[in-house]
Amino acid sequence: MTRVDPGRMTVIDLGRRVSAAFFALLVLGCCYLAPRFWEQSHPPLDATTLAIPREAQASWLAAGRVPKIEELAGSTMARDALLDLNTLSRLNGVPVAGWAPAWQYVWPRDAAFAASAFGRTGHFDDAERILQFLQDSQPTSGTFEARYRPDGSGPPDQRGIQLDGSGWAIWALDQVASELPTASLRRELITGFQPLLDRSVAAILHSVQDGSTLPPPSPDYWERPGRRVTLATCSVLLAGLRSAERLYQAIGQRRPALASAADRFEQTVLTTFSPDGFPRHPGGPPKSVDLGVAFLLRPFAGVTDPSAVQAWRRSPTFMRRPAGGLAPGGSWRRDGISWTPTVASYAMVEACEVPRERAVARLRWLDQHRTTAGYLPEKVRADGSPASVAPVTWTAAAVVITVDELEHGC
C-alpha cells in the first residue's frame, strides 16, 4: 500500500481550492461584465421629444431655406434635421444636445454645429441666440465648461473645463459671419461678439503658449477625462485660430502676431502627430486615429498638409463598424456600434476634400438608419437598428451643413 505524504496532500488540496476560487471569480466577473457589454452593444432607443406638429413649424421653416441636392431627391432628411434643431431649441432658444433628461444641456461643440447650420439656412436670429448664449456663459478666462444648463444658469455638474470650447466658439462665429450677405452685416455681427472672440483667442494662445507647445490635457468629444492631450483638442484650437484670422480681417483689424502663432501651432501639431499617422494621442499607434484628424481639414482648421489628408483618407479603415457606420475612433471599444455624429462629421469633410459621391454615400447611410419617426439617432447597432437618443443636435446640424456644402460648395 502506497503512503500519501500529508504535506503533499495539503499542497494539492490548496491548489485545487485556489483554482476553484479563481474559476468562481471568473464566472462572477463574466456575469457582471456580460450584461454591461450587452447594454453597450444593444442600447435602447429613446426617441421622445417635444411634440410640435410639423405644420406649426412651417412659418419658421419658410423664413429660411432647406438645402437640397439631386442625389437625395425624395428624401426629407435635411428638412427634418433642420426642424429637429428648431425643436431642440424650444426650451430656452438654444439647442440642447437631445431631449432625453440627461441630454437637456448645451454643449459648446454641439451648439457651434447648430449655429453653422442655422446660419447656412438663413435662420440668423437662431444662430445669434447661440452665439449670445456662448458669450454670456464664457468667463473672462475665455474657457468653457463641458456643458451648460439651457436657461443660462451655468454648468449642471463639476465636469470642469474643456479647452476645445474656445475653438468651437470662434469657429461658430466665423461660420455664421461668412453666411451674411454683405460686409457691413458681417462687421456688425463680429463687433457685437468681439468679447467672445477676444477672450477665446486669448485663452487658446495662453494654452498653447503662442503656438509653441501643445495645450495641456483636456477632455474632448469622447467626453472622458484624460491625462494626455488629444489631436482633436489641438485640431479644434487650430480651427479657432484660423477662424479668428478671418474674423479680425473682416472688421479691419490686422493681427500679424495671431497669424504667426497660428502658423507656429499648426507646425507644432504636424511635427508631433504626423510621424505616427495622426493618432489620438502623441506617440500612439496609427490605428488609434479618430475625428481629430478630420477636424484638421476643411471646413474646420483647413490644413492642407498631404500627410494629414492621407491619414484622414485612411482613417475610416480603423473606425468602420458592422452596420456600415463609424465609431468615434479607431481605439474605441469594439461593441459593434456606429455613431452618427462621427459619420455626419466625416461627410462634412468629404464634401470639401474628395469627390462628392463619398459624402453622398454617408448621407444616404444616415437616411437609411433614421427612426420610424424620421429622427437621426445618436447610435446604430450592429444589426442596423437605431439606438440611444434621437434626435441629436450634433448629427442633425452636420447633415444640414453637409447638404449645404454639396449644394453650394465648401
Image (cartoon, helix red, strand yellow):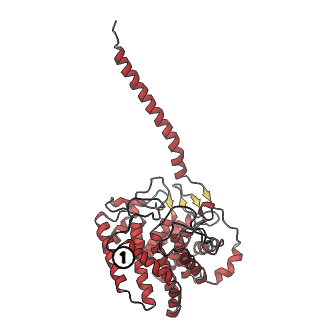
The x and y percentages for residue 43 are 56, 54
The answer to which quarter of the image holds residue 256 is: bottom left
Give the class, few, some or many, for how many residues have Cα within 10 Å of label 1's Cα (few <14, many ≥20): many
The x and y percentages for residue 379 are 54, 60
Q: Residue at x 54, y 75 (%)?
A: 134
Q: How many marks?
A: 1
Q: Residue at x 53, y 55 (%)?
A: 383
Identify the amino acid type marked 1.
Val
The answer to which quarter of the image holds residue 410 is: bottom left
> Which residue occupies the foreground of this view, 405 or 148?
148
Q: Is residue 63 visible?
A: yes
The x and y percentages for residue 131 are 55, 79
> Which residue occupies the foreground of this view, 72 or 265?
265
The x and y percentages for residue 122 are 58, 84
- Badge 1 element: loop
Q: Which residue is mark 1?
A: 303
- Locate the N terminus and report the quarter of the image it occupies: top left
Kindly give the residue lying farthest to the top in the view shown.
Answer: 1
Q: Residue at x 42, y 72 (%)?
A: 236
> Which residue occupies the foreground of this view, 253 or 59?
253
User: Does residue 270 lie above or below 197 as drawn?
Assistant: above
Kindly give the residue lying farthest to the front in the view shown.
Answer: 140
Q: Is residue 298 visible?
A: no
> Which residue occupies the foreground of this view, 58 or 71?
58
